[in-house]
């Protein structure tokens, strides 16, 4: 059902928290693209006029000095808190008036109401008065919010009420001021803290998750309205202080540029056919790592998993010998991801000696369940954790089958800087000129890559020699449902599989042979391999015999920055017909 999403000059948006900060920037961007009317709400009082001493003074230190001088001239003894309060009033007044003026300059119309959204009576009274002049409200953007970040055991009732009421009581009050059956737009500013959770923000996460659920309920009750709860990540403004920005950078959490975020808001208002009433915009929040007690007892874990073809749609893109077969990279991803989940905030750095012991085909021999055994082998003083891992199952006769193993998986609590690939060669020699899907065509005499869309991504061969091949790749992201039980988190099993395809091209070009993976001596991960844009694989041949081939794979960008390395990769040569049914 198409929602009523047309925005015209008579549209009236009620915007809480809308006169300052990022919500104001969004209102300005909306007015720029759709000149209409805005009722901006905020708790700050507007000054009747700016003090004379503040005129044309924009330097913080100078302005605070003038505030002190003014207080002294009036016989008062200035305190730092008093000076800061007056300074904030002046800056707040300037920002609100600048927002109103900018909206007017781009063709919109705006009024500012100084009111607390949690004060039901005052809010209804002021909105009733202003709508008599501006017209009936057609849209709500609820951007008001407060923070009181503390560990949960240190939070007070007042902290909770401050955070909760602005979001939830504020929404209830805003909705009470409009004719809901006629409302066309409802945008709720939620947060990724509600989606992922975040340390010190239990109240904020709770309030935002209630906003998410409210969006679903309101859409059911008022299907004519375009409802969306935007789970924003941190913005490069507002509540993200320089200190918090540094912490986000340390944890690999990207922040949203103000201009880009404002355009995303307008895009969500414009997107009238979106099925979901909840969207996430921003990097996932990874928890900070807890201090590691390296003298604590080493532990073992056993994880049971039932694998089904229905739960893993990508298997249709990995058919070997007529059967869906679990890629070896999914086996490594399961082991790595399980280790990371045991120690939140720690991230896979490298492993040694991955082996394919027996593949997992999805046929009549598929086991009832598969077992992952993890064994902690070391906890080092420099906050490193080491695991040993093995995946196994029992067949219907009770016989043990071992499928994949890794000798040691290393986790660290911080990012390791990406090195530069010293043997970078981006020159194009035009020896192999086929491109894109031609690598995956049916004719195995050319390149017998059997992979479907979930694993495709070779775009062109830059250069090839008896010692090396360099290929450009693009892995087009598949949706979460398609990823099944092996979701992309830090290690991407689909693009890792793709990164080994250059060896197939090299083998076919020089030897007219194919191989299947058997072993990786070492896998190092420095950064996430990008999706939907080019990356490059430099595959250096180590050895080639009649029955096997070994190579090093370096995955990097066009400047040689390394995302990851697969060193000592070994493949077993097989007949081409083995790939067919």
Image (cartoon, rainbow, N blue to C red):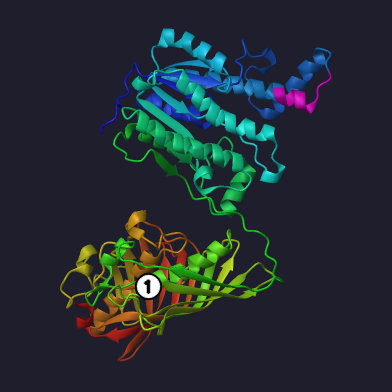
Location of residue 93 in the rendering, given as x and y in whole percent from the top left corner: 60, 19
Location of residue 315 in the rendering, given as x and y in whole percent from the top left corner: 29, 66
**Which residue, as the protein is rendered here, is positioned at the far bottom?**
546
Q: Is 153 part of what is drawn in magenta?
A: no
**Which residue, as the protein is rendered here, is positioned at the far front?**
397
Q: Please indicate whether residue 196 sits to the left or right of residue 260 in the image.
A: right
- Which stretch did the figure color magenta? 77-85
Location of residue 163 in the rendering, given as x and y in whole percent from the top left corner: 60, 33
Q: Please indicate whether residue 450 sits to the left or right of residue 236 in the image.
A: left
Which residue is denoted by mark 1 in the rendering?
368
Residue 151 visible to an observer of this rendering: no
Question: Which image quarter: residue 572?
Answer: bottom left
Q: Residue at x 45, y 27 (%)?
A: 141
Q: Residue at x 71, y 43 (%)?
A: 154
**Predominant secondary structure in magenta?**
helix
Q: Is residue 287 above or below residue 387?
A: above
Q: Quadrant of the N terminus?
A: top left
Camera-nearest residue between 34 and 312: 312
Q: Secondary structure at mark 1?
A: loop
Residue 485 visible to an observer of this rendering: yes
Location of residue 447 in the rendering, given as x and y in whole percent from the top left corner: 22, 74
Label 1 crowd (10 A; few <14 / some 14-19 / many >=20):
few
Q: Is residue 247 above or below residue 402?
A: above
């Amino acid at each position: 059902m198409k929602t009523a999403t047309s925005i015209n000059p008579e549209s009236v948006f009620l915007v809480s928290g809308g006169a300052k900060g990022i919500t104001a920037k969004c209102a300005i961007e909306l007015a720029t693209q759709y000149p209409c009317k805005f009722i901006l709400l905020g708790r700050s009082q507007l000054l009747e006029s700016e003090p004379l001493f503040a005129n044309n003074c924009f330097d913080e230190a100078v302005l605070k000095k003038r505030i002190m001088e003014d207080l002294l001239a009036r016989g008062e003894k200035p305190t730092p808190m008093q000076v800061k309060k007056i300074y904030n009033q002046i800056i707040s007044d300037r920002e609100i008036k600048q927002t109103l003026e900018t909206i007017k300059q781009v063709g919109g119309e705006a009024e500012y109401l100084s009111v607390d959204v949690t004060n039901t009576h005052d809010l209804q009274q002021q909105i009733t008065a202003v709508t008599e002049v501006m017209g009936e409200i057609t849209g709500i953007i609820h951007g008001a919010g407060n923070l009181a970040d503390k560990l949960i055991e240190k939070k007070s009732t007042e902290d909770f009420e401050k955070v909760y009421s602005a979001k939830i009581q504020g929404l209830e009050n805003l909705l009470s001021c409009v004719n809901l059956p006629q409302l066309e737009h409802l945008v709720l500013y939620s947060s990724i803290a509600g989606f992922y959770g975040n340390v010190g923000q239990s109240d904020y996460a709770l309030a935002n998750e209630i906003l998410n659920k409210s969006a679903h309920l309101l859409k059911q009750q008022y299907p004519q309205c375009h409802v969306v709860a935007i789970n924003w990540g941190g913005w490069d403004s507002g509540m993200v202080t320089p200190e918090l920005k540094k912490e986000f950078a340390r944890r690999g959490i990207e922040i949203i540029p103000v201009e880009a975020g404002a355009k995303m808001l307008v895009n969500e208002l414009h997107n009238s056919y979106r099925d979901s009433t909840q969207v996430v915009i921003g990097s996932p929040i990874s928890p900070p790592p807890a201090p590691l007690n390296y003298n604590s007892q080493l532990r073992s874990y056993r994880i049971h998993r039932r694998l089904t073809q229905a739960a893993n749609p990508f298997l249709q893109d990995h058919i070997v010998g007529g059967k869906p077969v679990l890629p070896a990279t999914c086996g490594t991803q399961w082991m790595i991801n399980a280790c990371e989940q045991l120690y939140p905030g720690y991230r896979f750095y490298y492993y040694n000696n991955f082996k394919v012991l027996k593949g997992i085909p999805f046929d009549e021999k598929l086991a009832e369940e598969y077992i992952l055994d993890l064994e902690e082998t070391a906890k080092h003083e420099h906050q490193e954790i080491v695991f040993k891992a093995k995946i196994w199952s029992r067949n219907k006769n009770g016989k043990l089958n071992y499928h994949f193993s890794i000798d040691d998986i290393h986790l660290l609590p911080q990012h390791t800087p990406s090195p530069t690939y010293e043997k970078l060669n981006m020159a194009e020699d035009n020896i192999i000129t086929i491109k894109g899907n031609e690598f995956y065509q049916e004719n195995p005499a050319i390149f017998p890559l059997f992979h479907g869309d979930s694993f495709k991504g070779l775009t062109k061969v830059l250069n090839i020699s008896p010692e090396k091949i360099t290929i450009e790749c693009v892995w087009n992201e598949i949706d979460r449902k398609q990823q099944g039980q092996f979701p992309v988190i830090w290690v991407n099993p689909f693009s890792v599989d793709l990164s080994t395809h250059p060896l197939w091209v090299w083998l076919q070009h020089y030897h007219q042979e194919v191989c299947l993976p058997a072993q990786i001596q070492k896998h190092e991960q420095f950064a996430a391999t990008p999706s939907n844009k080019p990356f490059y694989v430099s595959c250096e041949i180590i050895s080639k015999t009649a029955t096997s081939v070994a190579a090093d794979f370096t995955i990097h960008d066009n400047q040689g920055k390394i995302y990851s390395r697969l060193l000592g990769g070994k493949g077993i040569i097989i007949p081409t017909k083995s790939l067919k049914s």
